[in-house]
Image (cartoon, rainbow, N blue to C red):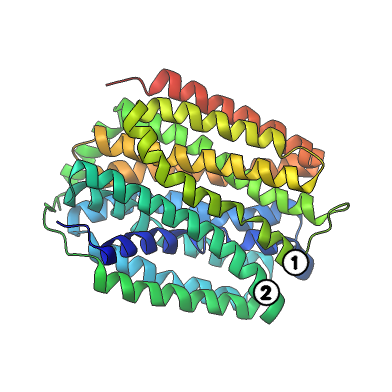
Amino acid sequence: MKLNRLLKYAVFLVGMSAFIQVYSVQAVLPLLMAELHAGEVQAGLAVGATVLGVALMSPFMGMLSDAFGRKWLIVGSVLYLALPTALLAFAPNIEILTLFRLLQGLAVPGITVVLIAYIGEEFKKHEVVQLMTLYVSGTVFGGFSGRFMLGHLTEWLGWRSAFLVMAALSAACAVFVWKQLPKSQNFVAKPHIQTALATLKSHLHNRVVLAAGALGGCVLFSLVGCFTYINLHLAQPPYALGSSALANIFTVYLIGMVITPLSAKLIRSFGSRITIFIAVGLSMAGVLLAYAQPLWLIVVGLTMMSSGVFITQAATINYIAEHVKEGRSLASGLYYMAYYSGGTIGAWLCGLAYAAGQWTAVICVLLSVQTAALLIAKKGMQAV
């Protein structure tokens, strides 16, 4: 299958659609806390609720996709995501907003889990690496644009109207992806539950899947914890940044769009495992810089931290695509369950840390988890 330009755009937009809603509320957390009378931990849980929804649904979506197909789940999930996003505009309190955020998360595995399996089945090895990096670049752009757009739309229209605009964008992306993403040619249905359970048992004893999942959990723990509570840190004196200024901070994600495609070269040159060591080290250095006082140096640190996370994710999902030959969708589902569970725990634990010791305590937690990521890559991701 030839990689035409519209196909590349479609894969990029799938990645963008998956993540444009997931973290968007981070840019307006201080405002939501004030208007909905929420504390730090409640605000963190509003972020983590979507991540929790992804974690809960990921393995089931993997089984469903292995049984019934790929494209319709991808497109349907992008379209469904528009509904709870629109409902956020009408949330009367932080509890209802958190519930709608959970519903958003239930849609995401139908995009992320299924697309990885789809790419692994339908394309040749060199094409897989290219499309995986395009997909991750799309997730990076989605993570940036969701926060950036919601922050600025909130200042222009108010946060409730801003969510309605974000919902319309998801619906438009679904239409484009439906038209441009080719139908599966190599998919073989495995509809029997016994087959799915046997595959699940195999994956739960597979070092590749277990190590990748544990590493993914550490990675998203760091990203969610850092980019949720840096907003509260920078909203306070001496910085006192508003919604638009906080949204502008997420421009660092655009650096990830440049860095992530280069990860394909790193993976081809050094392999996934060595690339992960380099990327996690870069991310740890960024966290240390984010503890600095000058705002410009914090921005440099956030750039390094997020770039390291994006490269680690690209290398990890490539590691799964390379080494898992059967039940790819379920393997991806298990990976994303662990990955997003880490994000949920990160939002919660870093919220407790922030409440107890402000940004300093969050930095200590982040460095501890990233150290664990290095140990997992060293011990669990040896050549197989």
Q: Which residue is mark 1?
A: 31
Q: Which residue is mark 2?
A: 154
Report the side of 44 relative to 38 (left or right): left
Q: Nearer the viewer, mark 1 or mark 2?
A: 2
Q: Residue 244 lies in what quarter of the image?
A: bottom right
Q: What amino acid is labelled 1 in the image?
A: Leu
How dense is the environment of label 2, judged by Cα within 10 Å: few (below 14), some, or many (20 and up)?
many
Q: Residue 101 lies in what quarter of the image?
A: bottom right
Return the residue nearer the eye: 265 or 376. Answer: 265
Distance of mark 1 from mark 2, alpha carbons?
A: 9 Å
Give the position of the C terminus as an image quadrant.
top left
Q: What amino acid is labelled 2 in the image?
A: Thr
Report the side of 31 relative to 60 (left or right): right
- The residue sitting at 68% across, 65% down in the picture is 94
Mark 1 lies on a secondary structure that is helix
On the image, the x and y values in percent for residue 147 come to 60, 62
Q: Is residue 380 above or below residue 322?
A: above
How dense is the environment of label 1, judged by Cα within 10 Å: few (below 14), some, or many (20 and up)?
some
On the image, the x and y values in percent for residue 374 come to 51, 24
Question: Does the image show residue 328?
Answer: yes
On the image, the x and y values in percent for residue 234 come to 78, 52
- The residue sitting at 69% across, 55% down in the picture is 42
